[in-house]
C-alpha cells in the first residue's frame, strides 16, 4: 500500500510540475524552430538575445528529470500492485483487530 501511495504522489508531482513549469521550456523550442533566435524577457528591461542551443538543452534536461520522476512513480505503482511484501508479516508481529492469540 505504501508503494502505491508513493507512486501516485510521484506521478502527480511530475505532471503538476510539467504543467506549471513546462510552458517556460516550450517557448525556447518554438523560438528556435520559428525564428532561429532566442530571447529572454526580463520583467524590467529590454529582451536579451540568448543561446538557443543552451536553452533547448535545458529544456531536454528538465523533460528528462520529469520523465524520471513519473517513471519512478510508475515503477513504484507496479511494485505496490504486484508485490506481496506487505502481506509477509510474521504472526507474532501482527497487531490490530484481526490478531489471533494471546
Image (spheres, rainbow, N blue to C red):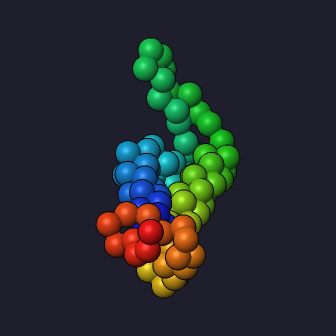
Q: How many marks?
A: 0
Residue 66 makes an appearance in the image:
yes
Residue at position x 44%, y 64% in the image:
95
Which image quadrant: the N terminus?
A: bottom left
Q: Outermost residue, top direction?
A: 44
Question: Height in image: 88 above or below 41?
Answer: below
Residue 74 makes an appearance in the image:
no
Residue 50 point in image, percent of width and height: 62, 36
Which image quadrant: the C terminus?
A: bottom left
Question: Height in image: 78 above or below 39?
Answer: below
Residue at position x 38%, y 45% in the image:
20
Question: Height in image: 62 above or below 73?
Answer: above
Q: Outermost residue, left direction?
A: 97
Q: Outermost residue, front direction?
A: 102
Front one among 101 and 46: 101
Residue at position x 56%, y 28% in the image:
48
Question: Height in image: 52 above or below 41?
Answer: below
Front one among 15 and 39: 15
Front one among 53 and 57: 57
Residue 96 point in image, percent of width and height: 37, 63
Residue 4 location, quadrant: bottom left
Residue 34 point in image, percent of width and height: 46, 55
Residue 9 point in image, percent of width and height: 42, 57
Residue 30 location, quadrant: bottom left
Relative side of 66 to 16, left or right = right
Relative side of 8 to 54, left or right = left
Amino acid at each position: 500500500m505504501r508503494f502505491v501511495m508513493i507512486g501516485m504522489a510521484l506521478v502527480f508531482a511530475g505532471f503538476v510540475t510539467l504543467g506549471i513549469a513546462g510552458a517556460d521550456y516550450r517557448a525556447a523550442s518554438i523560438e528556435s524552430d520559428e525564428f532561429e533566435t532566442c530571447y529572454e524577457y526580463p520583467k524590467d528591461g529590454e529582451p536579451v538575445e540568448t543561446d538557443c542551443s543552451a536553452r533547448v538543452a535545458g529544456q531536454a534536461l528538465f523533460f528528462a528529470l520529469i520523465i524520471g520522476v513519473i517513471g519512478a512513480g510508475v515503477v513504484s505503482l507496479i511494485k505496490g500492485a504486484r508485490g506481496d511484501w506487505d502481506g509477509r508479516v510474521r504472526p507474532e508481529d501482527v497487531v490490530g483487530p484481526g490478531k489471533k492469540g494471546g
